[in-house]
Image: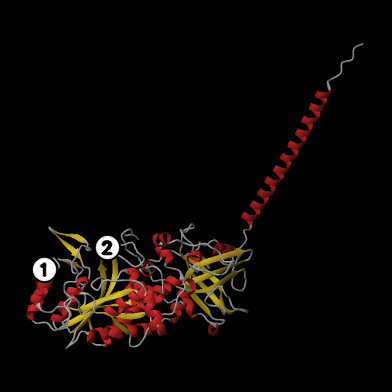
Amino acid sequence: MVVSEEPAATVEGDAASKKAAKKAAKAAEKQQKKAEHKAASGQQQSEAPEPDISEGRYGTLKLIQSSGEHRDRVYTDVKDLNVKLNGQQVWVRARLQTSRAKGKQCFAVLRQSSATVQLLVNVSEERKVSKQMVKFTGNITKESIIDVHAHIVKTASPIESCSTRDVELLASEVWLVSAARPQLPLQIEDASRPEKNDDPEALRIRVNQDTRLDNRVLDLRTPANQAIFRLEAGVCRLFRDILTKRGFVEIHTPKIISAASEGGANVFTVSYFRSSAFLAQSPQLYKQMAIAADFDKVFTVGAVFRAEDSNTHRHLTEFVGLDLEMSFKHHYHEVLNTIADTFTEMFRGLRDEYASEIATVGQQFKVEPFKFLDPPLRLEFPQAIQMLKEAGVTVGEEDDLSTPDEKLLGRLVRAKYDTDFYILDKYPLAVRPFYTMPDPNNPRVSNSYDMFMRGEEILSGAQRIHDPEYLTERAKHHGIDISKIAAYIESFRLGCPPHAGGGIGMERVVMLYLGLDNIRKTSMFPRDPKRVTP
């Protein structure tokens, strides 16, 4: 009898397939139970959804088109929140700077200009705050603008991360007014970090200058930038107030002109119908014409254009000029002293009225207190040459000072006289514009002056030639087409008092007063040879 025996491999194969079938059945059963559970829970939810007690108290506000809704609503500024308002309810509109949601609560920081306050949105039946409202707040993108209705609550301990430290906001309503996109080109926290930080634990993230300027709207939201441009507004206000108080009249001059006001090639040419014109390098000629028109003392604040291909830390192709001109009786130092006193009063005003802004800038940039004397220090050009010579630098008697020479002289003046502001008088005639009055005792010297802050020029000025024949002679000497400035020269044929003045670069004043390293930090939307946007 032959007994056939199945191979061992077949037996093992059957066992394996049975095992696999068993496993598949178990998985299918598990999947079915999962589906049944999901269906059951879905049915429960559809039958009895969890009530949202915050309904109508949060969400996206409809587009504000001035329809008249909520016009009676009173908003409180973040900077005005304090313990005196503890327990009160307020409406606040601000940016959501940061948020952190976890479970039944969401912490956020609200920012308005440079003032910040902590916001807490937590589940509360009393305030009708639901989990859905907490989740909604946590999902709002950074830098979005929101409206919050909240209780002001005194904090147990100071909130060090906010400018408002003794109170926080406990939300009862949150409305999204304007959403920011989720991915921002730079983070405000990164753009606000101190440029030099001695803390070894501090993050080394830095935002470079081009990224800042390409995304200037975001960059301008940092506390330091908010402070810089508020202080800059202060410079213009003080300039206007001080001169108005001294009897000056503010005038407005053309920016499209027929001839280069300063001479030379650093001028922008523009198409002007069938001809061409230039963008004004200075309001110089028109200030003088105003003096000839009996305005006696004038000033102007406006754009100045320089077509200089200078990619330096202190040059712009368009900047704001603070210009002034005044008649005098016998000596141009009457004007020089008026300008010097204006600067002294301006510096004092900035120091006394903008201390908080200066401190805010100091948190991000190293700001050395600006030093000045009253009355200001005045040196003559030969004295400066001698100081430089003693320091090992030779400058010709009829040469202009180079930028390194000016900076070195600034350090020498600071060391010797303990001032960051000084006046340099009696420049060589060869380095000044055609309308500059020569010195009566030395034809190689002029009645002109520059003023300096921290070793950099911030004002250039002089006595102007008010005699038409002499002015014509000097213009020809500089190669200027007399026909293009005929109206300017003609104004002096009608009788004109002796006069002098100067032009100030506003952005430079702010940069140097704060001790910043680049003029682009003090120009809101800078223009230089490589940048015409944004």
Tell me the kind of residue under disc 2.
Glu
Left or right of 55? Residue 254 is left
Residue ID at (75%, 39%):
26
Q: Position of residue 78 (x, y in %)?
A: 48, 76
Label number found at residue 308 = 2
Residue at the disc numbered 1? 476
State the image quarter where residue 519 is shown. bottom left
> Which part of the image, by quadrant, shows the C terminus?
bottom left
Left or right of 470? Residue 27 is right
Q: Position of residue 482 (x, y in %)?
A: 9, 68
Up/down of 193 relative to 245, above or below: above
Judge whether residue 233 can be spotted in this image: yes
Q: Nearer the viewer, residue 132 or 392?
A: 392
> Which part of the image, by quadrant, shows the N terminus?
top right
Up/down of 486 relative to 20, above or below: below
Residue ID at (58%, 75%):
159
Q: Nearer the viewer, residue 23 or 346?
A: 346
Earlier along the polypeptide chain: callout 1 or callout 2?
2
Q: Tell me the SS state at disc 2.
A: loop
Q: Identify the image's colour scheme: rainbow, by chain, secondary structure or one colour.
A: secondary structure
Q: Tell me the SS state at disc 1.
A: helix
Q: Position of residue 306 (x, y in %)?
A: 25, 65
Tell me the kind of residue under disc 1.
Lys
Judge whether residue 56 can be spotted in this image: no
Left or right of 471? Residue 161 is right
Which residue appears farthest toward the top when viewing the image? 1
Circle 1 crowding by C-alpha within 10 Å: few under 14, some 14–19, many from 20: few
Q: Nearer the viewer, residue 468 or 26?
A: 468
State the image quarter where residue 321 is shown. bottom left
